[in-house]
Amino acid sequence: MTTAPVPRRGALALLAATQLLLIMDTAIVNVALPSVGEDLTAGSAGLSWVANAYLITFGGLLLLGGRIADLLGHRRVFLGGLGLLAVASAAGGLAPGADALVAARAAQGVGAALAAAAAFALLLLLFPDGPARHRALGAFAAMGGLGGVLGTVLGGVVTDLLGWRSTFWLNVLFAAVLAVLAPLVLDRRTGPVRHGGFDLAGTLTATAGLGLVAYALVGAADAGWLSARTLGAGGTGLALLLAFTAVEARAAAPLVPPSVLTRPALRLSNTLAALAQTTLFPMFFLVSLYLQNVLGYAPLGGGLGLLPLSLVVVAVAPQTGRLIFRIGLHRTMTLGFVLLCAGTLWLALALTPDGGFASTVLAPSLLLGAALPLVMVTTNVAATAEAAAEETGLASGLVSTSQQFGSVLGLAVLVAVATSRTEAVDASRAAAETSGYRAALLTGAAFAGAAALLAVRLHPPGRVPEPTPVQQVPDRR
C-alpha cells in the first residue's frame, strides 16, 4: 500500500532548515560563552566544556543515530531528535549553574545527532542518486555555510540585547517550528524501516569508542596531547573501536556490516569528507579570532566578516550538480580541494598584524566560499552513492561522523599549532598572534592539498546520470 507522493520541495526546505539550525546552534553558543562565564562565574575550563559536551555527544552518536533511523523509521527519529533538542535547549536556558549547562549541552548533542542523521537519510531517500540529489545536497551545503555566519551574527545580537539565555530559547523556538512543520511535509511512512535484531554489543563499543576519542580530541587543547587524560581516553576509545570491528564480524545484525566497509569508494570518500572539515571548520574559527584579536573587530563584526564567504557558498552550491554532470564527480571534487588548498594558503600568507579586512581576508575568503560547496557536495555524493534503501541511515551516519570528527580533529590540531607558534614568537601581541594563525592555516592548507591528491584516486561507482525530470517515488514503510 502506498500514499501520495511527498511534496519534495517542502521536504527539502524543512531538512535544509534543520541543517541550518544545527550548524547555527554551535556558533550561537560559542559567541555567548563570555557572557555565560560572567553570569555563572565559570572559569575557562568550565566554559570550554559547555562547547565540548555538545561536540562529544554529537560526534559520538551520529553513527548510532543513523542506524536507529533505519530501524525505527526516519521521520520518527527525526521528530524525536528535534524534540530532545528543544527540551535540552530549554534546560540550558534555565540552567542555574555551569554543571547543569554542560549536562544540557550534552543532551543537545544527543538530540542533534538523532535529528542530523535522520534528516540526511530522509534527503537520500527522497532524492535518488543523480541531479536531484546533487541539488538537494547543494542546498544542504549552502545552509551549512550560512548557518555558521548567521549563528555568529545572531549570537552577538541576541546576547547583547536579551542575554545569553535567550540563545537557548531561540533554539527551542526554531526546533518547535520545524517539529510542527515536519508532519505536514514528511509522510509518516517516509523511508523504509530496516527489520532485524539490534546489535547491542556493537552499539556500546562504537558509541563509547567514538565518544572517548572525541573527548580526547576536544580535551587535548586544555590538558595537552601527551597528558594522561588525553592518552588514556584516546587509547581506550581506539581499543573499543578495535573491539567494535571484531564484534561486527560476528554479529547477526551488525551496526555496520563489514561488507559496507570493503567498498573502496565509500572508504575514500569518508576520508575526504573528514579532511575537508579538518581544514574548513577551524578556518572559520581562526578567521573570526584574527578579525577580533588582531584587527580589533567586535564579535558581531567578526561574524559579519564571514558574510561574503557565505554569500558565495549560497551562490555556488546550487550550481555544483551541473558542474558534476559536465566534468564528472571526481574532477569536481579534485577542483574543490585544489581551490580549498589555494584559498587557505592565500589567506595564511595574506594575514598581517596591521592589515585590514579588505586587504587580508576578503579575497581569499571568496575563493574558499567557492571551494566549500564543491568539496561538501561531492564527498557526500560519493559517500552515499552505493547506499541501498535500507542503508540510508547508515550511510548518512558514517559520512556525518567523518565530517564531525574531521571538524574536532582539525580544530584541536590547528589551535595547538597556532598556540605553540604564538608562544614561540618574541614580538608584539598582534604580530605573535598573526604568526600563530598563519602557521595554523598553512597546516590546514597542507591537509587540503593531501585531500586533492587523494581525490584524484577516487573512482565513484557508476556514471552520474544525466539531468532528467524528477519523478515522484512513493513512500514505503
Image: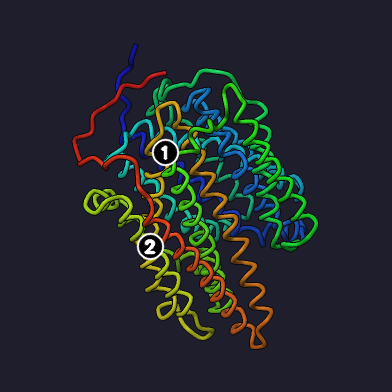
Q: In this view, does 50 lie to the left or right of 302?
A: right
- Classed neighbour count for the residue bearing mark 2: other residues with Cα under 10 Å, few (<14), some (14–19), many (≥20): many
* Residue beneath disc 1: 15
Q: Can residue 141 be seen in this view?
A: yes
Question: Residue at 37% of width from left, 65% of height from top?
Answer: 339
Q: In this view, does 255 lie to the left or right of 98?
A: left
Q: Is residue 79 left or right of residue 100?
A: left
Q: What residue type is labelled 2?
A: Gly
Q: Which amino acid does label 1 sit on?
A: Leu
**Nearer to the camera, 66 or 309:** 66
User: Which mark is drawn over residue 315?
Assistant: none
Q: Is residue 178 visible?
A: no
Q: In the displayed structure, would residue 320 be above or below residue 304?
A: above
Question: Residue at 62% of width from left, 58% of height from top?
Answer: 32
**Nearer to the camera, 108 or 437:** 437
Q: Is mark 1 on a helix, strand or loop?
A: helix
Q: In which quarter of the image is the C terminus?
A: top left
Q: Quadrant of residue 33?
A: bottom right
Q: Position of residue 367 (x, y in %)?
A: 36, 67
